[in-house]
Every structure is written in structure tokens, then in C-alpha cells.
Amino acid sequence: MRSRIMRNSGVVLGTAAFGLLVSAGPAMAEAATAYSRAELVSVNVGPLKVNPIRVEAPPNTAIDQPSFNLADIVKLDLIGLGLAANANPPAGTSDASVNAADVALSVGVPGVAGFEINENAIDVSCKAIGDNLSGTTTAASVSAKVTGPLGTPVLDVKIPVNPPPNFGVDLPGIGSLVVNKQVKKDGVITVTGLELSLLPAIGGGGTVELAKTVCGPNTPGGEVPLGTAAGLAAGVLAAGTGAAIVVFRRRRSTVGEQVATTDY
């Protein structure tokens, strides 16, 4: 199974357009909201922190180095990354996705205990259409294991290609893993591809989240005159917003970044 990321290309194609709808009749626009967010990774383990690499709609785009090594306790490497978030307030819909290729994540204390996971691709998505919330996680060609002293394998961890929601695995000496974690609350769905909960012995304990999407809340509203400040803002939102990031790199080389943001 292949990821939707093109591995041999580092080009992002995008269009940017901005406009307000004008009509000859009474100028009205829906005062509506819609929201989505896509994140690659966040780390909160003892004193070790990594702020999420993310895109949001409405756009508030940020990107950092997608590979890192935190004191040999949390390490991440990958080849390709795609993040996308879209919101359509008038329709009351939003969606978000994370697509990461050739992912290598390791967590643990060197020489004591560790967890390693390698994936050909991980694809995580969510969608909110009114109160209809849905999400999926696909993990292709996964190799995962718990290691003991000197890196000795202790447990092979089996992760299905299409894991059911909240598929949990205990990791001896490390903590626990939830794959395709899904939480629905107050019109919001959060889908996390992998969530590691670490014991205090591993860097002080904490969590590592990989490939996370958030959709909602989406609230189509009533009509307001476009001539007012609220109406002008509603007219802009009514056009819909979207943001996307694609990153390609070769291992042990400089990261190349391109960002495409679209209002449509």
C-alpha cells in the first residue's frame, strides 16, 4: 500500500484567490464558522517539548523541522509529509488530513528500554459534516517492537493496516500505545494516528502524539447584512478557507519546505 505522498517530487502546486460575493439584491451573508486542524507530531515528555507542526483552517499555518532527536529519548525521522485542513462555514463542513511517508519513531532510555516503530506510510483524516463526525487511520507496512537492555527485542507489536478506533497495546517497561485514537465531543472529532503514553521511568513520563487531525465545531449561522463589520467578516468566511503543507527531504540532508495556502 502506498502513501498519497509523491516520494520523488518536491514540488507543491497551489492557487491563491480572494474575493467577495456581490449581488444586486439585499446584501446578506451567513455568520457561520467552521474549523479543522492537522498536526504531524507533538511531544510532552518530562522537560522535553515539541510544539506541533500544523496547519489550520481558517489558516494559521506553522511549520518546524519535521525530524528531531530529543536527548536520545524521543527521535523522529521521515521522508515526506503532507498536511491539509479545509473549512466551509456556509456548508457547515470541515476536513483535515496528515500523510507521512517512511516514518521512523523511537522512544525510550538507551540501554534500558525502548519502543521503535517504522512505517512505510501513515494516513490520518477526519471529517465533520454538521453533526456527522468521522475519521480514519491507515498504517501501511508497519514494523514495531519493544526493546530491553542493549536493544534486545522483547515484544513484536502487531498493528493492523486499518486499525479499529482506539486500538490499544500495552508496551512492557514503556507504557501504552493507542492507534487510531478517536474522541468525539461537542461537535468536534479528534483522530490521532499514534498516541504513546510513557511511564515515569521514560524521561519523566508523558505523551507523544503522531499524526493528529481535528475537525469541528462547525456552526452555520443566521444572516447578517454585508454592510456591517460582522457581515463583511461573514462574507469572507463564506468563501471557505484551506491550508496545506507538503515537505519532502532526503535522509541526512537539508529540509526543503514549501507552503501553499488557498482561500476559495
Image (spheres, grey):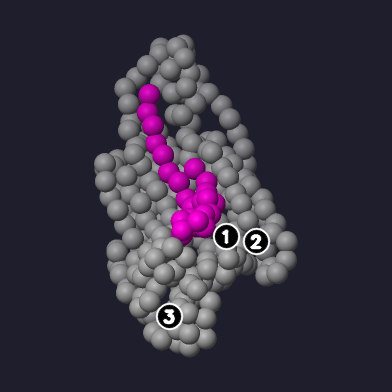
Q: Which residues are magenta?
A: 31-56
Q: Gap in Å between the C-alphas at discs 1 and 2?
A: 6 Å
Amino acid marked by disc 2: Phe
Amino acid marked by disc 3: Val
Q: Is residue 128 left or right of residue 53?
A: left
Q: Earlier in the sequence, mark 3 or mark 1?
A: 1
Q: Is residue 243 left or right of residue 200?
A: right
Report which residue position mark 1 lands on: 81
Q: What percent of the width, then of the height, locates residue 39?
A: 49, 52
Q: Residues within 10 Å of mark 1 (few under 14, many from 20)?
A: many
Report which residue position mark 2 lands on: 248
Residue under the image location 45 percent in, 78 percent down: 113
Q: Residues within 10 Å of mark 2 (few under 14, many from 20)?
A: many
Residue under the image location 73 percent in, 61 percent down: 254
Give the structural element (helix, strand or loop) at label 2: strand
Residue under the image location 62 percent in, 38 percent down: 16
Residue 233: say if magenta: no
Tell me if I can see residue 47 in this picture.
Answer: yes
Residue 55: say if magenta: yes
